[in-house]
C-alpha cells in the first residue's frame, strides 16, 4: 500500500510525521509526503493519521 498526501491541502502541522514516522516525512518543500510500499504493521497507525489530519489531506491506496 502507498500513502498519498495532497500537498494542496497539507498545512505542514507535523502531526503525521510525529505520530507515524515510518509512514511520513517532510519533503524539501516543507510539506508532508507519504511513503510507498509501506509494511502492513503500520497500516493501523496510518489510518489513525488519516482520521487526525486537520485538513483531510491523507489517503491510503
Ligand atoms: S497531518 Fe495533514 S496537514 Fe499535518 S503535516 Fe500531515 S498531511 Fe500535512
Image (cartoon, rainbow, N blue to C red):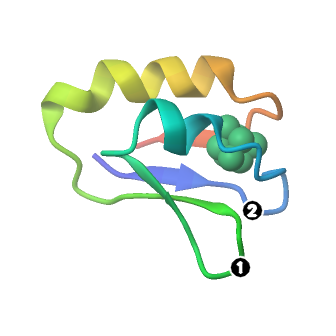
Between marks 1 and 2, how big is the CA–CA gap?
10 Å
Q: Name the side, left or right, on which 25 lies relative to 36.
A: right
Q: Residue furthest front?
A: 18
Which residue corresponds to the image point at 41% horizontal and 35% vertical from the top-left? 20
Under 8 Å from ligand 1: the CB of mark 1? no
- Estimate the x, y position of residue 58 in percent, counting from the top left: 61, 41
Q: Position of residue 4 (x, y in %)?
A: 53, 53
Q: Secondary structure at mark 1?
A: loop
**Vertical side of 8 occupied by 45: above or below:** above
Q: Which mark is residue 7?
A: 2
Q: Nearer the viewer, mark 1 or mark 2?
A: 1
Q: Are marks 1 and 2 in contact (CB under 8 Å)?
A: yes
Q: Quadrant of the C terminus?
A: top left
**Going 23% across and 48% down the picture, which residue do you hit?**
38
Viewer-side residue, 61 vs 23: 23
Number of marks present in the image shown: 2
- Label 1, on which residue? 29
Dot 2 crowding, Cα within 10 Å, few <14, some 14–19, many 20+? some
Amino acid at each position: 500500500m502507498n500513502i498519498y498526501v495532497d500537498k494542496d491541502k497539507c498545512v505542514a502541522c507535523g502531526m503525521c510525521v510525529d505520530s507515524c514516522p515510518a509512514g511520513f516525512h517532510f519533503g524539501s518543500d516543507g510539506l508532508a509526503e507519504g511513503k510507498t510500499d509501506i509494511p502492513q504493521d503500520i497500516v493501523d497507525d496510518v489510518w489513525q493519521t488519516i482520521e487526525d489530519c486537520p485538513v483531510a489531506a491523507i489517503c491510503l491506496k
